[in-house]
Amino acid sequence: MVAAALVAGVVFGTASPAAAHDGVILTLHGDGRGSVWVTATWQDGHPVTEAVGITLLATTADGRRQGPAGLRRNGDALTFAGTLDAGDWTVVAEMGTPAIGRCQGVLHVAADGAPQDIVCAPPPAAATPPPAATAPKASYTWVWYALGVAALAGLAAWLFHRKSIAARAAARRTPSRKTSTRRTTTRRK
């Protein structure tokens, strides 16, 4: 039971929250009078409730620029602290956490401007390339067999050499007895 819980924790506990929801969908919102905000939802429709790292950059054709500026959470909205002047603004919102997302669109700002929403779907998942054809790998198993045989031969030679050294040492330690057939006589005086 404990092992099953541990395995389940390892398998299911390692997934990131972003992986559980697939990609993120960013939506640019403008009230038409200069206020800009972004909403972020997961592809499965759930709102992004985790801490978000997102910036906004707005530029016009005549070179005016606002940002890049970090957006702040205000409920479900990620709001831009400033306001855009009248004109057509190319707005780019880029999210880095908890998922990668990007949304770009043109917002028209005027005194009597109309609200706009630009939905940016996540980029399609990259298709996995087919596996490359590989040449059959050469087998080097014979090298391991040769090394094993050489190791066994070396061990046998060492044991034989050790045994012969021990036999020579034992032969030197044993005193040799000579037997003589001659009688020794003692002389008396």
Image (cartoon, rainbow, N blue to C red):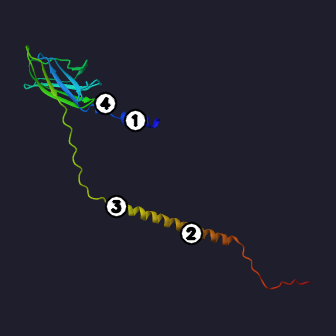
Q: Nearer the viewer, residue 185 or 35?
A: 35
Residue 141 percent location from the top left of the image: 38, 61
Q: Nearer the viewer, mark 1 or mark 3?
A: 1
Question: Which mark, residue 17?
Answer: 4
* Mark 4 element type: helix
**If you read the primary sequence from the N terminus, does the residue marked by circle 1 or circle 3 appear first?**
1
Marks 2 and 1, how far apart at CA: 58 Å
Q: Amino acid at mark 2?
A: His
* Mark 1 element type: helix
Query: Which residue shows up at 45% across the image and 63% down it?
Result: 148
Q: Amino acid at mark 4?
A: Pro
Residue matched to label 3: 139
Residue matched to label 1: 8
Marks 1 and 4, how far apart at CA: 16 Å
Residue matched to label 2: 161
Marks 4 and 2, how far apart at CA: 67 Å
Marks 4 and 3, how far apart at CA: 44 Å
Query: Which residue shows up at 28% across the image and 23% down it?
Result: 49
In the picture, which quadrant includes the C terminus? bottom right
* Mark 3 element type: loop
Residue 28 percent location from the top left of the image: 16, 23
**If you read the primary sequence from the N terminus, does the residue marked by circle 1 or circle 4 appear first?**
1
